[in-house]
Each structure stands twice: as C-alpha cells, then as structure tokens.
Amino acid sequence: MTHIDPWRVVTTLTDETSLRNGNSIFAVSNGYLTLKGNLAEHRGGDHPTTLAAGVFDRADWIAFIRPTGQERRFHDPKYFDNAGWSPSIANLPDPIHLRVFMGSRELTFRAGTVHDFCQTYEMRRGLARYEYTHVSPEGRTTRVVMERFCSMNDPHRAHLRYTLTPLDHQDRIQVISGINGAVRSNLHNEKQIQVLSSRPLPDGACHLRGRTLHSEISLETAVRTRITAGTVKCAEPRIEESAVSWVFEVEGRTGKPLVVEKVMVVATGEDEVHGVACDPVTELENASTPDFETALAEQQAFWCEAWDRLDVQIEGDDEAQRDLRFNLMHLMSAAPRHTDRLSIPCKLLTGEYYQGTVFYDTDLYIEPVFVFTFPEIARSMLTYRWHGLEPGRRIAKRLGYKGAKFAWQAGPRGEEELGPWWRYTVLNIHINADVCHSLMLYLHATGDFDFVAEKGIDILVESARFYCSRAERGPEAGTCSLVEVAGPDEGHCESTDNFYTNSMAARCLRNAWAMLDRMQRERPHQYDAARERLHIDPSEPEAWLSVAEGLRILHHSRTRIYEQCEGFFSLKDAPDDLLQDRPFWWVIVHPYRAIYQPDVCMALALNRRDFDPDVLAANHEYYMPITLNFSSMSFCINAIMAVESDDMAYAYDQFRTSAALDLDPARTGRNDTHEGIHGTNAGGAWMAAVLGFGGLAVTGDGVSIHPRLPEKWRSLRYRFRFRGEVITCHVTHDRVHLEANGETGQELPLTVNGTAVLLRSGAAVEVV
C-alpha cells in the first residue's frame, strides 16, 4: 500500500491531461502574484501562465460556446450572436523563462525519454517541486530538479532554484534565463500583452516593460539569475523581439550539480491603487541578498504561523487529511493580503477560466474559512464588496430598480464583467443576499460592529432597497413575489418565487432593518451619518420589513418540503438517460424535476440552525436523488445536509469528493482542473469538515457545536476565532474538548450537543 504523507501532494503522471491539470495543482501564489506549475522544459500544452491579481485585459470568453448551435435559454439572442470579447484576467510576461542546452541539443521534456518523474507540493512551506531523470536521444542522462515559490512576505517576489546534474556525461551546458513577453491567453490564444522595452542589467539581471493591449495597464518584470554551483565560463545578455535574457556557458562535470537560482519581481500599474507600488529594479536589488535557502526559511516561518490558525487535523484518514490541507493551502495562497480592494476569484488566481472574476461563491464558500481563521482577510473581502456598491448602483439603475445590484461576475473594481448576452447577470439577484449573509456571519463571529456601522450598513441598505423595488405584488393579499429569477440551480432560470432567493432576500431585508435599529440605539452619531450619507427616508425600513414578511415561501405542510420555485413539484420526472444524452453542460434541464446543484438545500445548509432537524432531513431526502451535481459547489452542501440528516456514509462520500476534486478527477469525471483550482469547492471542503462533521455554527445567538464524525475518523481537531478568542475544538466519537487559548478574559457561552457550556478565556471544558 502506498504511503500517504498528509503534508505532501505527489503525482508521477506524465500524460498530457495530467500535466495540464498539474499546472493548476502546482501553481504557486501569494494573493498578488501567481506562477502556474508549467514545466520549464515542456513546450506543449498550455502557455506558461503568470497572473497578477486585478490585472485584466480581454479575451473571447464565449468562443467555447458560440459554435455549438445548441439552444440556450440563459442567453439573450439579441446580444449573443454579436457578442464581443469580455474583460478577462491577463496572462503576463513569463519571468520563469528558462531553457537549457546540453551540447547542441535543448533539454526538453519530449525530446528523449523521462524516468522517475515526480511533482510534489510541500504544503508546510508552500514549495512546489518537480524532478525527473532525462535521457537524451544520444543516450546522455541528466537529473533535473525545479523548486519554486511565491513569497508570502513580499507580494511582488518569487524565487526558483533549478538543479541539473549530468550523470554520465560532461557536455557543455548553456543556460538561457530571463523574461519572455511573447505570451498569450490560455482561453482562446488571445494576445494580451505589448512589450514596450527590454534591457539586460548587470550581474545576470533583466528588465522588461510592457502594457496590456486594451486596458493599457503598465507592466514591469525584473529578474536576476545566478549560477550558485558550477563553473561559469562566460555570460552575456541576449535581447530578442519580445524577450530578454542572459546566456550562461557552464562547464558540465559528471556527477556535479549545476544550480541556478532566480529571483523574480513583478509590478503593475494597478499597484498604487492597492498601496503596494514599487520600483521592480530596486525591489530586485532588495530581494537578491538572501539566497534561495534563506528566502525559503522565511517562507516556511510564514506558513508555520498560518497553519497554526488554518489547519484542520483529521486522525485516522491520511488521504482526506492531505486533500483538505491542499485546499486550505491554495485558499491561503489566493488571499489578497496586500489590499482590501480585491477579493478571491472563483479559480483562486490559478487560472484564466471564468475570466478571473469574483462570484457569489467567494462570499458563501470561501469567506467563511477566513471569518473563523483570519478575520482580517474576511474584513478585506467585505470591503471589496463595499467598493463594489458604486458599480452596483449603476447596474440597478440601468435595470430600473433602486439601491444597488452586485455584479454577477465582479471584476477588479466590482464592475460586471459578463456581457448582456448572458441573462444570468439580470436573473441572479440572490448575489446581494449572499453578500449580506457573509457580512452577518462576520459580525456574529467577530463582534466587529464598527465595520457594520462604517461600511456594512451601506451594503445592507442598498441591498434592501434593491429587493424592495424588485419585488412585485403576489397572488394573495399581502404577499410579494420575485419574478424572473435564477436561484443557485441555474437549470431553472426565469423562475418565480425561488425558495433560495426569497428566503435569503427576506433575511437581508430583516437584517438591514435590525442593524439600522441597533445603530440608532447604540451609535446615534453613526446612525445619523449613515442616514444622511445614504439618504434614508424614515419610512424605508418598515417597507423592508413588509416585503420580508410578504415574500412567498412555497412549502408543503404535510411533507415539510420546500418547493424550489413556483410549479417545480409539477414538472416531469427526469428520464434515466438524461446525463448520457447531454452533450454539453448548458443543455437546460428546465422541463424536468431535476436540478444542476443544490438550491433549497443550499439555503437550508447555510442557515441550518434555524430549521428543525426533521425539516432538514425531509428536504435532503427529497432533493438529493434529483440533484445532478454539475457544479463543484454541490458536494459540501450535500455533505452538510447529510450530516444533519444522520446520513453519514453519504456525507463522507460527498466530503471526499469535495476535498479530492482537483487531485482525483475520476471522482467526478470533470477533468477540468487545468482551467484553475475549483476555489468554491476548496472552501466547501473546509465547510464540510468544520461546519458539517465538526458541527460548528455561529449565529446572532452565539456558538453551537454539534459534531458527528465519519466512522473511520478517530478524531477531528480545528481552531476557530470567536469574538477575539482562539478556541480549539477536539472532537472524538464520545466527547468534545474545548480550550480557549486567548487572554481576553471573556466568559463565552456555548452550546455543545444541546448542553449549555461556559468557556472561560485561558481555560478548557469537556462535554461527554
């Protein structure tokens, strides 16, 4: 049986699909900069990919869909056939650019044969590595090792170390190392970058200036290459049309490693907006003092502290442990700690798919991880949404409504990046309620009412206004309807009174009223400022409550099952071969009582402490068999609902699918990790483990913990932050042990398995 190291992701696969997926799996990132995991010696497959958070140009996003000729209910034919390119995250000049010649032949992955290939992610220190033995067509054998990381201590900086060891020859070695600006988007091979100038600098350094073609964002890349082991016979610069490099002639010796160390610095014209502007050449000088090992030690120190907060420890299931850590590492690597004007894209800055934009997935699936581990990051993500109110106001006004409507696919400044050809931008109005849900979770967990009074109240008020103006009179007296909407199940767009949308919107409306009321009582000066800033009419809050009470919630009183939308129960049963006969994912399942992904169950899972256990179980039992799970956001919701329904075998299966989705494509058959890590799913794996099996729930009433472990797990240990206190929760099958590790002096009332518990700061308590 293969040993699994729960701190290392390892693959030995070299087929083209696995290598492409590996580009995302082994991407290194620090929330500002990403270098995908492309092999320096592999010329096929995807373009080398370098991404900087918030740096967009454009790409032909719909090129994948246009030629199919399929009917698509969610596309507006007025716009679709003539749709142009869309704003999209840009693929920047490649700072890894590294080529090696052994004698007269270039060392490439496909010229010759490769043995003992192994890619590894060392998650304790955020280090990606690949290694293999290469045998050239002439029979010369060379050992290759590449290591790299993006600095978690400096957003602009990345490091690599490349080691070549001739095992049976003494060929002259030529190393070409620099910056390549001849890169293209991986979406549809678009050219996005114009190189303006390039120049060599002393001591193996290079500098390249460019800009994005259409958004005209300035770009600068500086690198320094040093040969730290091996005898350099000569070194000279080389300037090409779109590249600049140094060429090192090195004497090859059998059994003697040649070590190349490279420091890379990327800066963009967006840096000033985010408060991290720098001169890349100066930054390169500052970054060149420590060698690779010293910089790596600094990296490991960061991750040691990060894992202390972030880690979730599973005893008895090393594979699940490894997979969960993989997702947590990528989430942390994607967090933009350098700014509060950006959030985390659904592909975690590891891919260009979905244009690098922010969906509601971030608010509901990714942000909770940080609410409980790094609340300062969660606050920044909410601030990004606050900045997005202004474009949201313009969207609402264009649609004929009041308040603000958050963008469906939000760009760097919160603007809508999906064109009018996709009707979801109009129909998916639940995005506002999702943002407000994350805001209230943040408030309940942190107690940070300062943020709510300063910024969060704007989000709540403008969202309440939007829903109030969007609602129409319902069929019965005193009722309201939300018509022409798409809930999370995008297979039934254009629906009326979608349960998810109505129930979440009603919560948003009530919370807007409640937070204004609290401000008026507790912070009258800030209340007056908000009322003046937002031009709040005294009659508005009561109107919000009226709409909240009137929104129709369709419910079968006998079965206690919520109807997903008006008429859903009357739809036809889905044929058994529905999946087999669907050549494209966008073939709508609208005529059938089948759904893309959890909808009713998603609303129940997010607010599960507000529903009776038998209601959760009844809806899980009804909707689970008809949920097709096309979206990666499905599996954690399924797992949480299954835990609440005591369906533990299914809960474990769905958690494992969520945790391993990007590492084991066979679990879903999707095989699309090359497009980027499924960020929604990464956050969902944590949700399934901590909120599901760990039983953690935080509401306005406080903390409740009601855990249930999978049979094979011996224990589960996680940490969470609550009101400034760090609480360690250690769960076994027969007890829950809690420790408050802080020094706040608080007494925290908790509910554990239905028992009221008082946990004092600096103390511990155990519930059997």
Image (cartoon, rainbow, N blue to C red):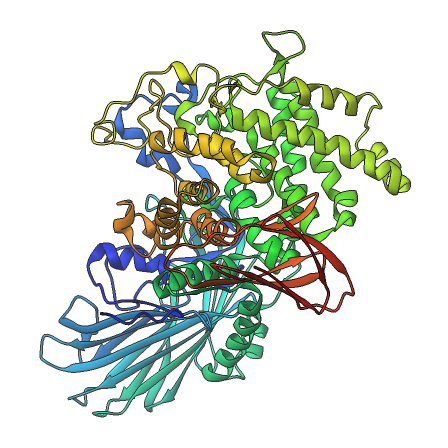
Instruction: Locate residue 163: give its quadrant.
Output: bottom left
- Residue drawn at point x = 78 percent, y = 22 percent: 542
- Residue drawn at point x = 43 percent, y = 22 percent: 79
Left or right, 428 with respect to 324, comes to right
Q: Quadrant of the C terminus?
A: bottom right
Quick check: 747 above or below 620?
Answer: below
Can residue 406 be seen?
no
Q: In the rendering, at what x and y percent does residue 327 appear?
A: 44, 58
Q: In the rendering, at what x and y percent does residue 189 appear?
A: 32, 47
Q: Quadrant of the N terminus?
A: bottom left
Q: Decide which of 678, 415 is in the foreground and name it.
A: 678
Q: Decide which of 1, 112 is in the foreground and name it.
A: 1
Instruction: Locate residue 67: give its quadrant.
Output: top left
Can residue 471 be seen?
yes
Which residue extends farthest front? 768
Left or right, 405 with respect to 311, comes to right
Q: Decide which of 312, 428 is in the foreground and name it.
A: 312
- Residue drawn at point x = 79 percent, y = 49 percent: 450
Q: Decide which of 490, 691 is in the foreground and name it.
A: 691
Q: In the rendering, at what x and y percent does residue 722 appear?
A: 68, 56
Left or right, 730 with respect to 663, comes to right
Instruction: Locate residue 77: give its quadrant.
Output: top left
